[in-house]
Amino acid sequence: MARLKNGILGGITGVLGPVDGYMLRGQFILRSRRGKSNKPPTEKQLIQQQRIRMINNLLHPITEFVNAGFAHVATGKAQTAYCLASSYQHKFSIAGQYPDFTIDYSKARFTEGSMSTQGINASVISAGNYLKFTWTPDLSYAHSNDHVMLLAYAPLLKEAVYTICGAKRSIGTDVLQLPADWGIGVVIETYLAFKAENSMLCTNSLYLGQIK
């Protein structure tokens, strides 16, 4: 059953014959209902299904992080921040050929924005049960109060730890505590970005390499 949210001139929510109606980011959307098919999937469909699963597995542990990191570029668009992050990974982060696709973590991007990454000079080292990130402090009026965004991702565990509002850019260093059960030998992919203090603006995320 479908409902008219604002009378006869309003948008439709629910099922109406062969279409579904729903609201997305303030806009009413209509789409064809998908019926079940008894046909085996084509290779093209299998390729797409595998890519979607890989990206969902990649982003699921860091949904909050990418929602913050892609929030500004999603402003005014029908797509959500998560969808834009997913779209980016589909285009640039998947390597190899079906059925042996892999994620190229050096090309993954988890924040996107117009703030410059020039002069950041970021690095990360392992220090016991935490990671120590460093960068060149920015003492300028425009960026000294930016906050660092840190991400440590363990692909084999499908887990991540992160901070969305870490130390100020003027400080030049911050740490991430690692879970005790990650243990020695867990491969960790590391990223850093900066987010403006009073807006959704941020830099593109920077890949800082693997920690083993």
Image (cartoon, grey):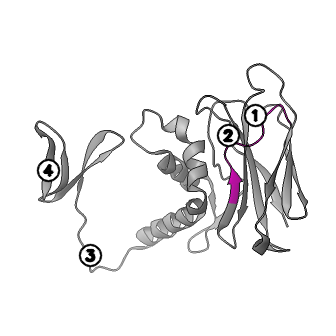
- Of circles 3 and 2, the one toward us is 2
Location of residue 21 with respect to 56 vertically, above or below: above
* Callout 2 amino acid: Asn
- Magenta stretch? 161-171
Disc 4 packing (10 Å; few <14; some 14–19; many ≥20): some
**Could you say where residue 56 lies in the image, as x and y percent from the top left?**
52, 63
**Could you say where residue 146 lies in the image, as x and y percent from the top left?**
72, 32
Location of residue 195 with respect to 192 vertically, above or below: above
CA distance for labels 3 and 2? 41 Å
Element assignment for label 1: loop
In front here: 208 or 152? 152
Q: Give the residue at mark 3.
A: 37
Split into 4 quadrants, where in the image is the C terminus? bottom right
Look at the numbered discs 1 and 2 and tell me whether their residues touch, using CB distance below 8 Å: yes
- Of circles 4 and 2, the one toward us is 4
Split into 4 quadrants, where in the image is the N terminus? bottom left
CA distance for labels 1 and 2? 7 Å
In front here: 192 or 164? 164
Q: Give the residue at mark 2.
A: 204
Disc on the earlier residue, 3 or 4 = 4
**Could you say where residue 109 lies in the image, as x and y percent from the top left?**
65, 49
* Callout 1 amino acid: Thr
Q: Give the residue at mark 1.
A: 117
Q: Give the farthest residue toward the left.
A: 8
Q: Give the residue at mark 4.
A: 3
Location of residue 86 with respect to 77 vertically, above or below: below
